[in-house]
Image (spheres, rainbow, N blue to C red):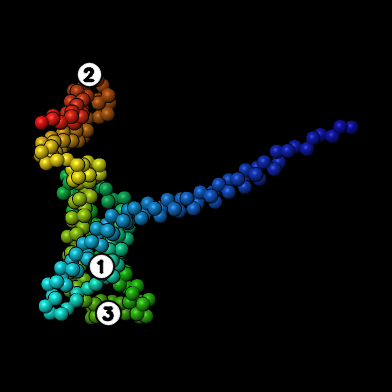
Amino acid sequence: MKSDPVPQAISVPRVDVLARWANKDSTLPRRVGAWLLRELRGALPPTLFFFVGFNFIILTTNLLVADYAVAVSNFMLASVAALVVGKAVITANAMAFLKIFDRAPLIQPILFKTAIYWVATFVTRLVERFMHFSVVDGNGPSGFATYLISGFSWQRFSAISLWIFVLFLIYVTASELSQLLGPAEMRRLLFTYRPSELQLNRRQRARELMRLNRLADEHQVEEFRDPGSAAHHQLVEIVERLARAPRQR
């Protein structure tokens, strides 16, 4: 009597499960590495900017008080403060409401993001001070409020907070202009264009980009796709003016 063959597909699901787990284990370090790289890229610009800004403030302040043989701060404190600000910027960027003014006039997102970054930095600095009070100094958490009232130097904290606000205002303004014009265009404006070209082309390109922005706000996508519509003709004219090569002198 001929017996039925033993099916061979019984072990296939187990192999698929093992392969799936192996792929998951192999991709997990990549995801973690990509996340860390993305976070570092987000924190690097503000950290470098405030690293230079804080050290410049400390240098000039120490020069002003040099006649009194007083040193206001040092390099390490400025570096730690720059790291704290970078961490605060990462925290603020994770909030979805940070982009609610992206389509408003430029002054609104600049002031709004400056205020959000400043508040996040303010809270982060207080948390960092609380950790130092509790862990490094070995005090109980319940005594932190009393320390803030009696032993904390609010004058120094407020002065640093004011400088942080001013530096954030400069940083956010430069960041918004870079996003508006594009990093490549900013590099060309700073390092490539000659003054004779820049004086003419910068105004023309800025005006055409503003016209393009208004046109996109006033019309739907279907109107731009219709070759017979007025919106399509205006779009083509703007693109032609933007793509036109500058005349050689």
Q: Quadrant of the N terminus?
A: top right
Residue drawn where x is 25% and y is 62% of the image: 51
- Quick one: SS at disc 2? loop
Which numbered dot is residue 146? 3
Label 2, residues with CA under 10 Å away: few <14, some 14-19, many ≥20: few
Residue drawn where x is 25% and y is 26% of the image: 224
Disc 3 or 2, which lies upstream in sequence?
Answer: 3
How far apart marks 1 and 3 lie (CA) works out to 27 Å
How far apart marks 1 and 2 lie (CA) works out to 60 Å
Disc 1 or 3, which lies upstream in sequence?
Answer: 1
In the picture of the structure, the residue carrying the numbered disc 2 is 228
In the rendered view, does 38 fall on the left or right side of 227? right
Which numbered dot is residue 78? 1
Q: Is residue 238 visible?
A: no
Q: Is residue 249 above or below residue 127?
A: above
Return the residue found at the far top: 228
Q: Which x, y percent locates residue 209?
A: 18, 35
Q: Tag 1: residue type?
A: Ala
